[in-house]
């Protein structure tokens, strides 16, 4: 594949996924923001604990294997082996189904034990309600990986939208209805999180129909000889297990973090059980907002893996290195301003969205917003390493980052002067360590090293300028309009619009974005000409 075409496919795929993410994030906000206000800080704590456990099982079952499947399909397609592609998919489907069923049964049969393990026994009903979603998501991941390996991001995008749509409608209706008829917060939280199960099933049905219509068995004139199922399964596990281990490290650390925060607040910081739940609930709400930029990095990481893998298979290592650098630059360009914006406008954002939330919310969001910068870069650099057949290396950075998070959280959350604020500081430390180590791995990798810092500093400078403007506009308008809810909404909106305009100008002037970058997207030539970028 020519240089221009390989990048173009990657960016087109990323654009399709990004459009889906934008829709799902809007729907997700419609789901989680009202949900946080319906359940309150305490009820949202039940929801977050159950969701943390769900995420661990989700990571164990779907973090590595879909990436491995995508890589294997991409390699087989590049080498022109359609029969190998079909067998890889069938074997993967069986592996995914078995793993998903086992995981779902564990959550379904032992919800109370898992909740007690987290020092949050009231989360048991939520754990039970979300358990079937694991099985549905595993099957869906196989379909998605098969399509993504062929650089087809459309079914993934549509299924994600359907998944969130089902979750939003079912979850909100159940949460509202159960609280309205006087059910307890644990029951209402269980109803809310059942929306995840309903949405996952809806998306799975769509993927089954799409695969049947667009990827039916075909008669091949000159069929290739596929590998034996056992060998394919071993290859899938050989690639997927290291990636799963690496990803699971962070999920397990986050699970330990949830237990550690609740425990240290009560045993060391002197916070009551009720107040600890409230603090963890507002922390979860701040996490929901800070996760928005991180979710938008997913389209790039999903699209970059088959694109780089195809180049590596062909031996085009220089082009793979260029594409890796471009992906890091684009990630920094898009996601740095999001994190900076959350940090500088954290106080009015929390006041507008969660007006009755705990007073700790704004500072928690500010710290998490800063951490978001490192989360996005860590995710992208990890994807580049995985696509380059170096999936073992990110495990080291994740282990080091996880250790830093536990150490910082244990120390700071237990300090009465710091308390809950130690949790986001631990997150920041975790991903900063990961970024530093991944940057070293990319710089000193055996074939065609990737320099990270040159791809970042222009975006960082543009984001800093944007952040200063955003804060200045908000502070100035607040002084004039006052501190009412409507005035705050207007001031935040004006600050965001001004910040976006300034960031665009700064990105062009600092050459954070180049004409070559713009020409790789639809109608990019016209945009480059309008912005006078050569």
Image (cartoon, rainbow, N blue to C red):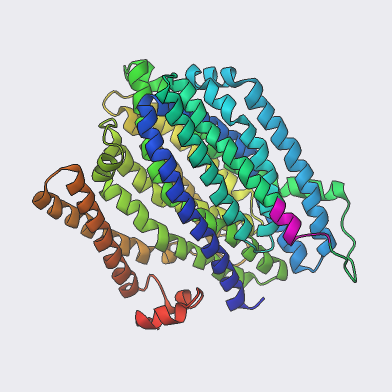
Q: Is residue 154 visible?
A: yes
Which quadrant would the N terminus be assigned to in this image?
bottom right
Residue 113: name its quadrant: top right
Question: Above or below — where is 470 with respect to 289?
Answer: below
Residue 249: name its quadrant: top right
Q: What secondary structure predominates along the stretch shown in magenta?
A: helix
Question: Above or below — where is 445 with respect to 192?
Answer: below
Which quadrant would the C terminus be assigned to in this image?
bottom left
Measuring 51% from the left and 75% from the top, which residue is drawn there? 520
Taking depth in this image into account, of 79 and 411 the one nearest to the observer is: 79
Q: Give left or right: position of 210 versus 288.
A: right
Question: Above or below — where is 2 with respect to 111?
Answer: below
**x, y percentage for residue 407?**
43, 31
**x, y percentage for residue 454?**
42, 66
Measuring 78% from the left and 50% from the top, which residue is drawn there? 235
Total labels: the figure holds 0
Q: Give left or right: position of 60 versus 23.
A: right
Q: Which residues are magenta?
A: 209-217
Taking depth in this image into account, of 470 and 407 the one nearest to the observer is: 470
Measuring 83% from the left and 60% from the top, which residue is drawn there? 217
Taking depth in this image into account, of 272 and 191 the one nearest to the observer is: 191
**x, y percentage for residue 156?**
61, 55
Q: Is residue 429 visible?
A: no
Q: Give left or right: position of 455 versus 76.
A: left
**x, y percentage for residue 492?**
24, 52
Q: Is residue 471 magenta?
A: no
């Amino acid at each position: 594949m020519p240089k221009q075409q390989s990048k173009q496919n990657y960016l087109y795929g990323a654009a399709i996924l990004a459009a889906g993410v934008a829709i799902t994030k809007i729907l997700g906000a419609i789901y989680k923001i009202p949900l946080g206000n319906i359940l309150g800080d305490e009820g949202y704590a039940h929801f977050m604990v159950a969701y943390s456990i769900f995420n661990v099982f989700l990571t164990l079952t779907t973090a590595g294997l879909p990436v491995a499947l995508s890589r294997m399909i991409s390699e087989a397609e590049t080498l022109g082996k359609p029969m190998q592609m079909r067998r890889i998919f069938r074997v993967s489907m069986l592996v995914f189904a078995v793993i998903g069923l086992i995981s779902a049964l564990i959550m379904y049969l032992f919800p109370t034990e898992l909740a007690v393990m987290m020092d949050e026994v009231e989360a048991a009903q939520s754990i039970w309600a979300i358990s079937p979603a694991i099985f549905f998501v595993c099957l869906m991941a196989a379909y998605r990986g098969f399509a993504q390996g062929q650089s087809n991001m459309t079914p993934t995008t549509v299924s994600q939208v359907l998944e969130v749509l089902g979750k939003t409608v079912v979850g909100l209706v159940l949460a509202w209805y159960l609280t309205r008829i006087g059910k307890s917060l644990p029951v209402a939280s269980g109803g809310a999180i059942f929306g995840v199960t309903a949405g996952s099933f809806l998306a799975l049905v769509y993927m089954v129909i799409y695969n049947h219509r667009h990827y039916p068995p075909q008669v091949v004139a000159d069929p290739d000889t596929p590998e034996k199922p056992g060998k394919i399964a071993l290859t899938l596990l050989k690639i997927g297990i290291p990636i799963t281990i690496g990803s699971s490290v962070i999920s397990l650390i986050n699970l330990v973090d949830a237990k550690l925060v609740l425990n240290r607040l009560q045993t060391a910081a002197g916070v009551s059980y009720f107040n600890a739940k409230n603090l963890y609930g507002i922390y979860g709400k701040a996490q929901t907002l800070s996760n928005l930029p991180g979710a938008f990095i997913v389209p790039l990481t999903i699209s970059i893996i088959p694109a780089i893998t195809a180049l590596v298979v062909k031996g085009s290592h220089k082009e793979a290195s260029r594409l890796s650098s471009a992906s890091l630059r684009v990630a920094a360009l898009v996601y740095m301003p999001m994190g900076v914006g959350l940090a500088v406008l954290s106080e009015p954002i929390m006041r507008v969205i969660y007006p009755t939330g705990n007073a700790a919310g704004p500072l928690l969001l500010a710290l998490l917003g800063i951490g978001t910068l490192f989360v996005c870069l860590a995710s992208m650099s990890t994807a580049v390493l995985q696509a380059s057949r170096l999936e073992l290396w990110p495990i080291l950075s994740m282990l080091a980052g996880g250790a830093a998070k536990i150490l910082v959280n244990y120390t700071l959350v237990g300090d009465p002067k710091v308390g809950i604020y130690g949790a986001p500081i631990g997150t920041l430390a975790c991903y900063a360590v990961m970024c530093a180590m991944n940057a070293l791995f990319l710089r000193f990798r055996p074939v065609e090293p990737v320099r990270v810092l040159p791809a970042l500093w222009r975006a960082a400078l543009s984001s800093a300028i944007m952040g200063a403007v955003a804060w200045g506009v908000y502070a100035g308008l607040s002084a004039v309009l006052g501190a009412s809810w409507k005035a705050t909404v207007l001031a935040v909106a004006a600050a965001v619009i001004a910040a976006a305009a300034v960031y665009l100008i700064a990105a062009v002037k600092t050459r954070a974005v180049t004409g070559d970058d713009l020409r790789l997207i639809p109608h990019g030539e016209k945009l480059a000409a309008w912005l006078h970028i050569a």
